[in-house]
Image (cartoon, helix red, strand yellow):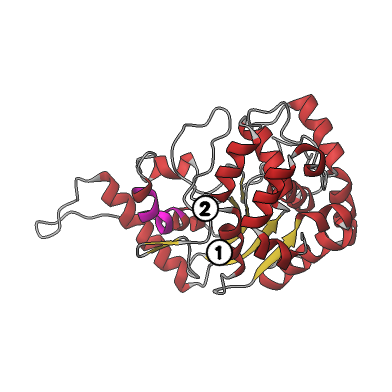
Amino acid sequence: MSGPEILIIATPEAPIPVDKAQIVITILYIEFNIRISLKYIMIIWLASYPKSGNTWLRMFLKSYFLKPGEKFGLENSRLDNFKSQGFPDQEMLDHLKVDYNKFEEIVKNWEAMQDYINLNNITNYIKTHNAMVTVGSYKFTTLRNTKGGIYIVRDPRDVLVSLSHHMGIDYEQTFEHLSSSYNFEYPSSGEKRYKKTLMGAWSDHYKSWKNFKSCKTLIVKYEDMVLDDYNTFKKIINYLTEIDNAEYNEEKLINALKQTQFEELQKMEKKEGFSEKGKGELFFRKGKIGGWKKDLSVNLIKKLEKVFSKEMIELGYL
């Protein structure tokens, strides 16, 4: 469904506004009210702390939703309803003329950017590393734009190792990043350096999505994706059938699992490259469980486990 044509008529009492940004906002507002009156609520969040399996999930879903004859690939499988750059991305910020370097301006436009995404009136699967937070009076999202969410959580010890390689900083610096209550996503190579994604500490990030009760959020452990991929991804598809019009198809599930095995994604990256690669050699580097045991020092392990002990016990990591 395409949006309505907007006719702006100038009269002496109501001249055409000269502020182009105001015109854009007015059109978005009109389109949004038409959409909301028809009960279009389109965003399903694919959320996680960085290096927790978000990209793997997105690749699986892209493969699962491909139409017959379409070819799967890391870059050429960018379906219209998948926003791979994450939220908020540069296109949205540019469209609404939001200053990248002013986080307070980004916060004020969270809803407007989601309205903009939802103008296509299809279900949008949106990657984000943002915490589910409220800054001042501004909420990250509300039910007017959000249909549901899948949150992937991973052992923070493995997150630390993987994120360190991705960011190109040492383990101690990465630990400070993970444990800081006020931090932002570190940009991938090629991205502008600006504060656009508020993450916070690993534990706070997890709790923010776990406690988001406005709509049903599915919590998925990365370790279950690795150790029991069939049942875990089947649960994900079944969740999508509950909250959206997705259909469960056993053949498509099996095929998507084969296409998106970690080793297969790694082979494709080595052959094709991958735009989401950070400062490490590969984005799909190892993906193993428990690699931290041989990489992290005893002292650093103790520090991390002390800071995150409550959540790690809850999730079965301790």
Q: Mark 2, residues whose alpha carbon is within 10 Å: few (<14), some, or many (≥20)? A: many
- At mark 2, the secondary structure is loop
52 above or below 271? below
Position in image of residue 177 (x %, y %): 56, 43
Q: Is residue 58 visible?
A: no
Q: Main secondary structure of the magenta part?
A: helix
Secondary-structure class at tag 1: helix
Q: Where 213 falls versus 137 (above or below)?
A: below
Asked if the residue at tag 1 contacts the one at tag 2, i.e. Cβ–Cβ closer than 8 Å, the answer is yes
Question: From the viewer's perspective, is 304 left or right of 121?
Answer: right
* Residue 216 makes an appearance in the image: yes
- Identify residue for label 2: 200
Name the residue at the front extreme: 299
Q: Residue at x 72, y 53 (%)?
A: 154
Q: Position of residue 45 (x, y in %)?
A: 60, 58
Q: Residue at x 18, y 54 (%)?
A: 10
Q: Which residues are magenta?
A: 105-113
User: Label 2 vs label 1: CA separation?
Assistant: 10 Å
Residue 240 image point, x, y percent: 71, 66
The residue at which mark 1 appears reads as: 208
* Label total for image: 2
Q: Position of residue 83 (x, y in %)?
A: 59, 47
Q: Residue lying furthest left in this view?
A: 12
Left or right of 6 on screen, residue 295: right
Residue 62 among those drawn in magenta: no
Q: Residue at x 85, y 37 (%)?
A: 264
Q: Name the quarter where the C terminus is drawn.
A: bottom right
Tag 2: amino acid: Gly
* Amino acid type indicated by mark 1: Ser
- Earlier-in-chain disc, 2 versus 1: 2
Q: Quadrant of residue 76?
A: top right
